[in-house]
Image (spheres, rainbow, N blue to C red):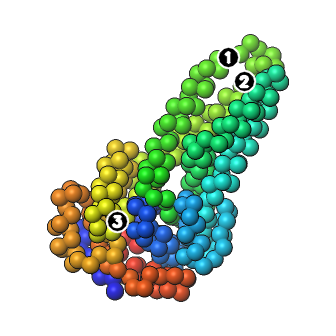
Amino acid sequence: MIFRPDTPQAISLPPIVLLGGKGGVGKTTLSAALGLALAERGKRVLLVSTDPAHSLADLLEQPLGDAPRRVQGGLFAREIDPEAARAAYLDTVRDNIRRFAQPEFLQEAERQVMFAGQHPGVMESALFEALCRCLDQIGQWDHIIVDTAPTGHTLHLLTLPQAMGAWTEALLARQGEGQGGPEEERWQKAREVLQARRALFERTRDRLQNPATTAFLLVANDDRLSLLEAERARQTLEQAAVSIPYLLINRSQDDADSLRQRLQHHFPGQTIHPLPNATPPPLGLTSLGDFARQLADVMDWL
């Protein structure tokens, strides 16, 4: 059973909600249950996973792909495929090179793209850009719930808007004004592409840092390693100016007051929301729906 926590302050969930934490703490189950609970209240919800393990499809017992697929009622789900994101990202780079590069540089540029595509940083950049474009469609949904990959990967994604924006600025600064004629026209088109990407990253940064738009729900279990990782993640998220309205302690065996008193020293000022263990863990829409309704009964911010 799940009990009603005595939280000091209720919140309303913003349009974008990210759940993150150490691998295995229950992020996917909570993300799916939260999405179902909101959908049952008439909301149109997109549940997105950036985890390459594809555990969301396993939990829902439904095949998912890189496009939103209706799960039930107003709930849709999508798994961003890192390989597909990387391929699309590189295709875009190649297309831009063919459009904007001088003919004598095309062969060498293609070779450099091929080598760059094997770098792990390209995968992260591609995944981040796919997530940016997904969040940019928030007008189509009441909520986008993001089930993130394990903490380290997620935190790196959250630091990318500034890094990729700076990289784009540098490219724009190096282009200059051109020499007129066809050359100037080519550079102007290239600048428009770069400026559009910069605007996308700026919108993402502004969304992530606006508590009226985005909340990051940090999930942990009541064990030393999970809590240490949550503590580090909280510090990084605060430095990135990302709102963390709740720390969710999943599968808690302790009573709520004792747990909060014990953890408050490590998470000063943080609202701690204990959730006891659900046995057996939900699997499939039937048991997940039961869990979602229990979650909705006890969480005053749904």
Q: Do the residues labelled 2 and 1 touch (CB within 8 Å)?
A: yes
Looking at the rendered structure, the number of numbered marks drawn on it comes to: 3
On the image, which quarter does residue 255 sit in?
bottom left
Spatial CA span between label 3 and label 2? 49 Å
Q: Residue 177 carries which label?
A: 1
Instruction: Select label 1 or label 3 by which is in front.
Output: 3
Given residues 207 and 227, the one toward you in this image is 227
> Element at badge 1?
loop
Q: Three-letter amino acid code at disc 2? A: Trp
x then y, percent, for residue 263: 21, 64
Point 74% across, 43% down: residue: 91
Mark 2 lies on residue:
187
Q: Three-letter amino acid code at disc 1? A: Glu
Q: Is residue 241 left or right of residue 59?
A: left
- Quadrant location of the N terminus in the rendered image: bottom left
Instruction: Select label 3 or label 2 by which is in front.
Output: 3
On the image, which quarter does residue 68 sit in?
bottom right
Q: In this view, does 192 lie above or below 120?
A: above
Point 56% across, 47% down: residue: 124
x then y, percent, for residue 193: 68, 35
Mark 3 lies on residue:
220
Spatial CA span between label 2 and label 1? 8 Å
